[in-house]
Image (spheres, grey):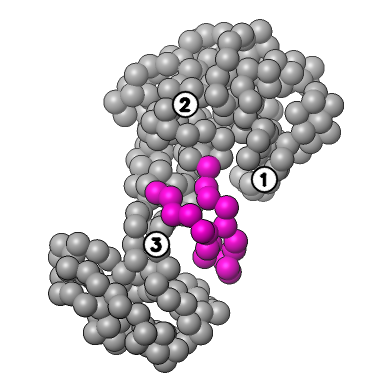
Amino acid sequence: MPPAAGRLAEPSIVLAQTAVSIRHAAFVAVGAETVAVAKDFDALGQALEHRQIKATTFAVTVKKLPGAPPVPSPVAKREIGMRIEGRADLRNPAEEFLLVATPQALYLGRVLSRSDNAWRQHERRPHTYIRALPARLARAMVNLVAKPGQQVLDPCCGVGTIPIEAEHIGCRVTGFDLSPKMADASNQNLQHFGFPPCAAVADARTLAGRWDAVVTDLPYGHIGHYEDAKSAAEILSNILTLAPRAAIVLAFDATAELTRLGHPPRQVIPVPASHSLVRHIHVIGPG
């Protein structure tokens, strides 16, 4: 689901006021409740002296990010464990505490959720092609504009990368592709992972209906089934009327075209794909 508003404390660390599950996250590994933040290990120990931390059983893990000063893991685990009221259990703890060492600070948190990383498995789908959207990126796009239970449309579904990720997080998905071969490959990939087939053959320029969100990787270059810029503009013009929110990938920044169509993106995220391709994710609709 869309993430809670937060601030980037430093690279790899985001602090937010609201706790949300990151089980289906693509680029967030662990969600934790902040227990303490300190500039060094001595200051962390002092901060914990004034806290009453309780857990029936617990384990402490240490993650050192690049550039962080040395933090001896056994010492850190022992010192933190001595300040937690409960019994250490490394095999089956009721709660886990994570110490993250960064170049700027030490962050101690009580782990609330972890990403399931299922997108890694989805990369091993039976059917793919050289420029297919990475599953991890597809999951991030779905999370930007849709929640579990909502109806998601992918009007150019290709081999089903986006429908698979949307189905996995609990969305109800409809997929279409102009190519019967692609629609069939999408359905086979979905069924391979235990999801119902949802793809059919249709022209994205003439689709009608209403969904909660559109998430799609528009055809571009020699792999596309639409051969000219006019067709791409016609696709955009139509699919933007089908849902209040959208996450759309193009090989260029289409802000001007989307604004002309009355749907200026609230965010454009460039994602390098290769030496010759940069994908641009256009996020449209209310945040």
Q: In this view, does 28 lie to the left or right of 75?
A: right
Q: Which amino acid does label 2 sit on?
A: Gln
Could you say which disc has been placed on residue 269 in the image?
1
The reply to whether residue 47 is visible in this rendering is: yes
> Is residue 94 magenta-colored?
no
- According to the picture, the residue beneath numbered tag 2 turns out to be 150
Q: Where is residue 100 in the image (x, y as percent from the top left)?
A: 42, 73
Of pointers 2 and 3, the one earlier in the residue sequence: 3
The reply to whether residue 228 is visible in this rendering is: no
**Mark 3 or mark 1, which is nearer to you?**
3
Q: Where is residue 287 in the image (x, y as percent from the top left)?
A: 63, 40
Of pointers 2 and 1, the one earlier in the residue sequence: 2
> Is residue 14 magenta-colored?
yes
**Image quadrant in which you'd find residue 122:** top left
Q: Where is residue 191 in the image (x, y as percent from the top left)?
A: 32, 22
Q: Could you give the CA–CA distance between mark 2 and mark 1, rounded to whole angstroms?
A: 23 Å
Per the rendered image, the range of residues in magenta is 2-21
Could you say which disc has been placed on residue 32 in the image?
3
Q: Which amino acid does label 3 sit on?
A: Ala
- Secondary structure at numbered mark 1: strand
Q: Could you give the CA–CA distance between mark 2 and mark 3, rounded to whole angstroms?
A: 26 Å
Q: Position of residue 1 (x, y in %)?
A: 48, 40
**Image quadrant in which you'd find residue 234:** top right
